[in-house]
Amino acid sequence: MRSDLRTALLMSAVLAMGSPEASAQSIAQRVAQVSDGSVRLSFAARHGVCGNGRNISTSRDTDEWESDCDSGPVRVALTLRNRRVAAVHTYVGGRWRAAAGPVVDLGLVSAQAAADFLLDIAGTLEADHGKDAVFPATLADSAVVWPKLLAIARNPKASRGARRQAVFWLGQAAGDAATRGLDSIVYQDSTDRAVREQAVFALSQRPKDEGVPVLMRVARTHPDPAIRKKALFWLAQSGDPRALGLFEDLLAK
């Protein structure tokens, strides 16, 4: 009886490790056990995401034509060298190939846990690897990602690629909180100009009632002429009548 109980408890623990309820911490712990090789994980994709293996769309066709496009899951492969993430590859649709080398497959994990884990490592990875870790996190079903995206965008130690990618997806996020975060990035003195310019672009992608007033303030008050010029450019593209009033005021001075 005691042996059966121990076996049942062990099986429960194994199932819990691979269950969709696994936390970001437990994903990180399992990844940390791999020195060299590949770690694979899968999680549910948010509504509208689909892919054919390589190409990924974030807005599935809604008219009379629908392309051959699988709605998930999102599959992420991490390549590790010397216990460091050396590459991040993301797929939607298709299927895993048989591994040519050592592979640890975590199976289906919680979408929120996967997003948290990917954003946690995105700010620490070099070059494009940080950017590549941000993207799959934005595909996770029902995951709240904007607070961590904002933290990456504000982190001067994160790679430029990761920060610009974070700013871009903040611009796609819904809600006033995301717009306030973008506003703060534009005015942050320690932020790389390219990242600030990306924040200005992201504001231009927000609904007009959210983005245009902030862009107008940036165009009037930002101390960097290049940032003011970017804001004016995107205001001109907006077609918003409030922008014409701003142009008239500036030209009349």
Image (cartoon, helix red, strand yellow):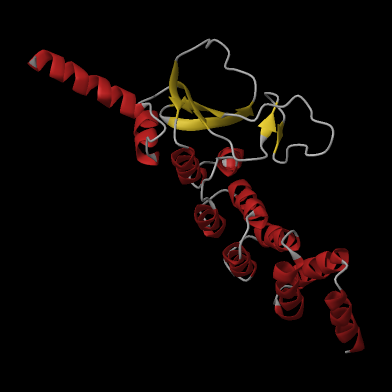
Residue 187: percent from left, percent from top: 62, 71
Residue 96: percent from left, percent from top: 57, 17
Q: Residue furthest front?
A: 64
Horizontal placement of 83 versus 201: left or right? Answer: left
Residue 88: percent from left, percent from top: 56, 31
Q: Which of these two is toward me, 155 or 3?
A: 3
| Image height of 46 relative to 206, above or below | above
The residue positioned 57% from the left and 56% from the top of the image is 153
The residue positioned 58% from the left and 13% from the top of the image is 97
| Quadrant housing the N terminus | top left
Q: Quadrant of residue 15?
A: top left
Q: Quadrant of residue 146?
A: bottom right
Q: Which of these two is toward me, 200 or 16?
A: 16
Q: Which of these two is toward me, 61 or 58?
A: 61
The residue positioned 76% from the left and 76% from the top of the image is 216
Horizontal placement of 131 versus 103: left or right? Answer: right
Q: Which of these two is toward me, 76 or 232?
A: 76
| Quadrant housing the C terminus | bottom right
Horizontal placement of 113 versus 100: left or right? Answer: left
Residue 138: percent from left, percent from top: 59, 44
The residue positioned 60% from the left and 29% from the top of the image is 72
Q: Residue furthest left?
A: 2
| Image height of 230 relative to 80, above or below | below
Q: Total of numbered circles in the picture?
A: 0
